Amino acid sequence: MTSRKLVIAIDGPAASGKSTTARLVAARLGYLHVDTGAMYRAFALKVLRRNIAIGDRQGIESLVAGTHVALALQGDVLRVFLDGEDVSDAIRSPEVSRAVSPVSGYPEVRRAMVREQRLLGAAGGIVMDGRDIGTVVYPDADVKFFMVAGIEARARRRQEELTGTGTAIPLEAVVQDIRERDARDAGRAESPLRRADDAIDIDTSALTIEEQVEIVLKAVSGILQERRKR
Ligand code: DC
């Protein structure tokens, strides 16, 4: 009997290692990886480009209706498209990082993105990472993970990521940025960052990427074995 492909949810705060882990797990399983943070970032970039004020709820909510965000794998790199334009590098800028948390807090923005995310996973075979995947997007996901890491480890990772895109930022500034974003993501009214009660916790502070991937794959393979027995 062939098992149905799973829906795997990975949530956690900024730079906790979720996206890299999700991408590699998806590659190993032959599943689709959806980085939902990248989707919100792409939309926040559009808001910035249109010069819409971050506090202009009506302006932002009406913009989302005519926006198309798509993800596509090129080789082993996930590319992000905003209305057909590849914005994979632009969405990692500090400006977008600052704007994305408030922009993603507007209810209509979340509704549009969550609708898209549910369509992407409708057939299973998906690894989706974000803040509310196990709680809101897929409360019935087959398996959920909640990844955390110490602030130092997270800041270092984000700094390396930024260096990779040609932006040099002092570590203290990255720490400050992540702290502010944590507070906003966890404190907002709409879909705040919250651990699902049935999530498996992974603290990635002292783990290598490969170790993180192995922990997730082991749990997934346990579930697949259970299913085959039924
Ligand atoms: O994972 P990331 O740092 O790229 O996410 C960028 C922002 O998007 C983050 O500050 C909060 C928001 N986000 C969200 O609200 N819900 C998600 N499912 C994913 C990200």
Image (cartoon, grey):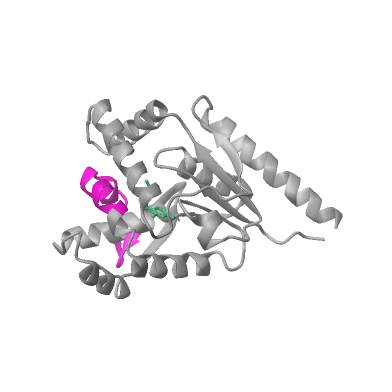
Give the answer, above or below, for where 167 lies relative to 109: above
**Quadrant of res 165:** top left
**Quadrant of res 3:** bottom right
Give the answer, above or below, for where 97 lies relative to 61: above
Q: Is residue 80 left or right of residue 126?
A: left
Estimate the x, y position of residue 86 in percent, counting from the top left. 30, 57
Give the answer, above or below, for where 217 lies relative to 159: below
Residue toward you, 175 or 129: 175
Q: Quadrant of the N terminus?
A: bottom right
Q: How many marks?
A: 0
Question: Is residue 86 visible to us here?
Answer: no
Q: Is residue 102 left or right of residue 6?
A: left
Residue toward you, 210 or 203: 203
Question: Is residue 110 visible to us here?
Answer: yes
Which residue is at a point 43% across and 58% down the rendered structure image? Answer: 191
Which residue is at a point 63% across and 35% down the rendered structure image? Answer: 214
**Quadrant of res 64:** bottom left
Q: Which residues are magenta?
A: 80-101
Q: Quadrant of the C terminus?
A: bottom right
| Residue 99 counted in the magenta span | yes
Residue toward you, 61 or 162: 61
Give the answer, above or below, for where 1 lies relative to 15: below
| Residue 227 counted in the magenta span | no
Q: Is residue 152 left or right of residue 207?
A: left
Estimate the x, y position of residue 155 in percent, counting from the top left. 35, 31
Estimate the x, y position of residue 212 in percent, counting from the top left. 57, 34
